[in-house]
Image: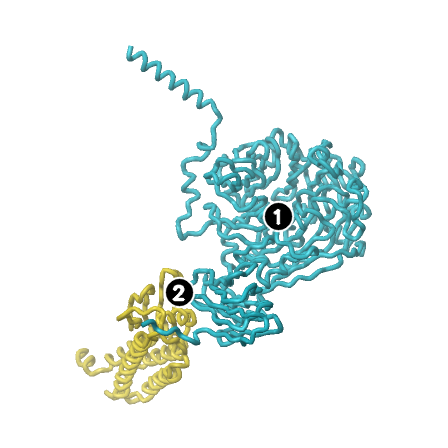
Amino acid sequence: MKTTENNIGVLSKILLLISATLLVISIFKPIWIIELNAPQYPEGLVLYIYANKLGGNVDIINGLNHYIGMKTLHTEDFIEFTILPYIIGFYALVTLVVIFINKRIALYTLVVAFLLFGIVAMMDFYRWNYNYGHNLDPHAAIVVPGMSYQPPLIGYKQLLNFGAYSIPAIGGWLFIASGVLMAFAFIIESKLFKRTKK
Amino acid sequence: MKNKSIMVALAAIAITTALQSCKPKDSSNAVSGDAASKVYVAPGKYDEIYNFVSGGFSGQMSCYGIPSGRLLRVIPVFSVDPEKGWGYSEETKPMLNTSHGFIPWDDLHHVQLSKTNGEADGRWVFGNANNTPRVARIDLRTFRTAEIIELPNSGGNHSSPFITENTEYVVAGTRFSIPPDDVNGDVPIDSYKQNFKGTLSFISVGKEDGKMDIAFQIQCPGVNFDLSRAGKGVSHGWFFFSCYNTEQANTLLEVNASQKDKDFVMAVNWKKAEEYLKAGKGRKQAVRYAHNVYNEKTHSATSEIRTEVTVLDSKVLKDICYFIPCPKSPHGCDVNPSGEYIVASGKLASVIPVFSFDKIIKAIAAKSFDGEFEGIPVIKYESALYGEVKKPGLGPLHTEFDDKGNAYTSMFVSSEVVKWNVKDLKVVDRAPTFYSIGHLCVVGGDTKKPYGKYLIAYNKITKDRYLPTGPELSQSAQLFDISGDKMKLLLDFPTIGEPHYAQAILADVIKKNSLKMFKIEENNNPYVTKGEKEAKVVREGNKVHVYMTAIRSHLTPDNIEGIKMGDEVYFHVTNLEQDWDVPHGFAIKGASNAELLIMPGETCTLKWTPDRVGISPMYCTDFCSALHQEMTGYIRVSPAGSSVPISFGTGKTPAAPVK
């Protein structure tokens, strides 16, 4: 088989194959987790965000949120849960196609597109957090002037008696690992890398 | 001169001190230095052991943590409990139904944990009703009474609810012999010897669901059956009952039932009884008794009156029952872990006789009998006796066993626990109790594999042990460390009612199965409201059904109109919470019964008959949330014949803001 400078190396192809596999798995695992702890909840409450649904103690969290006038969370209110599994699936498929096309330019495009997807997804997540945390019912039982209940995008934040801890869940880590592997392939294949190697 | 007076003073002090030390040691120095650390369970930490304690005349069962002695829960069983709505809610009223009708009180004496292979399996705990004879089964997933069965032909169900090694049977022996239920009981009381009979009931227990059923009864001579224990290991298939009043006295038993030197232990071959039952030797007898079952899915109880039992006659079916003479009004009748030794405590006796199962069987085979009593063979005392514990103390009552071959017997009169070795029958230690111990409990002490470590004494008298509370004082339990050679007193803790028998089990066996809440989707109560949208008020003649929901922090509906004088209002309250430890309560002004206490996912019903026209408030009684005080509502009662229509709602008319 004739190899040219524009083809992708075997190592990179393996990385891409793993990357695609991880993406497929991530569709079925919770991507993000928001852990809530309060004095009355030593056992903790969790909200799992999957590619296609909300999981964990959704009903209990909704029950508690009504005190501060936060809108209740329902899977069907988020268009993202309908399309996200397909987008991730699409990226997995494209990753496989890149291996098949065997062109570096395709790989570069994939990595850039994937990175963009990650950024857009996080922006979208932030937007929802912001909306739920700020659009509060003015007739709510508990109104603390100036207080909003936006959970942290990532990390820890105290919201009244609840400590909210927001981090990627297993699916999220798979997704990140998948991106890291693609990035590795990108570096391996980039001319910059080859030049320094010489 | 000065020196001399100092010398005199010192001598006086020395003499006083010496005299003081001659006095027997009192309770203040009966506790060793490290006792506190042995009972200290740090905040937030769990106890090692669950202790199920009979509530005696409270009719309930309590559950304590050991070694801390902390009260964890009072389980309502035979007595109504307005705190929990037990016996007041429409759903639980049938649990206290009997052939005499609804009975709001009883006297719970003994507890028994269900067993598998002779060890406590932590599935159920049984309790007896001593006054109106019944046996209850408590489910240890929910710590609630799941079933109560009444016992016909019985008076004073005392030797109960003792259990066989695989929970095949729970027994119930009548303390008071009475004329059987199917004959005319209108007889002179002094015709006791002719007309009164003792009855032993064998209640079968469903292997999976625990459902109780009176498999058969054995009719016995009229005596008082006091306590009992199932054989185990080698003696599995037998039951042993202590009997007193073999004088068959019917008045002033204190004197008249204490005349004979020896009363009896009755050995019952229940495997043989089963054979006779199968062979159709039982007599069907017309009786009436209630069988009450609580259904965890409908969250309600049903009561059924049953009308028949099968009775085996011990006089006719010769080889079921045998009497063994036992000194002076035996009380406790306990079987050691191997099943070979039966310890009977004559409460007025100066020795504790220990019988050998092996010798009993041989004596029966050799017909080593000393005549008959009321048609039942009496085995010769010496032929059944393994030996006697000499000078054990005064007033021996009950015996439990540890894992090292020792027995512990409670001594009511001399107020002490006596530890003795089962093999050589020698007393090895004694420890005072404060005061007048009744029952005692070693962890796993009636099983094939006792855990030992702790012994708990249940005392009848406390006097000066706690801060005084007027003439009525609590009774108490005392915890001993029995892990060493010497018993060490660790802790006193007060108990509810009067503690009789109690059992203890390692917490791990039970806590993993403990239910956190009821699933709302599995709630099949006919009056469940599975969501606020389904809440409604329905009039059926003068009965008004309110389908109400409770969730933090409002009742739906919370404004109800159209109720009229003469109505009976049924509040069917469903707790919609599906969260751990969020019960809601429900109370309404003027209710003549009690409150409801509703667990997450459960439906309970309170009946309310308004007695006046006007507005009655109602509210949640269990501080459920920050806005619990807002969890309230009003009901409007109009005069009979009023045209105010039924209307209801929650949050329809938000209050106008105050300007």
Q: Quadrant of the C terminus of chain B?
A: bottom left
Q: Position of residue B400 (x, y in %)?
A: 58, 41
Residue underneath mark 1: B107
Q: Residue at x 77, y 45 (%)?
A: B197
**Residue kind at label 2, given as amino acid type:** Leu
Residue B462, percent from left and from top? 52, 37
Relative to B577, is B7 on the left or the right?
A: left
Where residue A143 sits: x, y (%)? 32, 70
What tint does the image give chain A?
yellow
Badge 1 amino acid: Asp
Image colour assigned to chain B: cyan
For image coordinates 59% across by 68% down, the residue present is: B567
Measured Cα–Cα span from mark 2 to mark 1: 40 Å
Q: Nearer the viewer, residue B526 or B539?
A: B539
Q: Which numbered marker is on residue B627?
A: 2
> Mark 2 Cα within 10 Å, few/some/many (few <14, many 20+)?
some
Residue B586 relative to residue A158: left or right: right
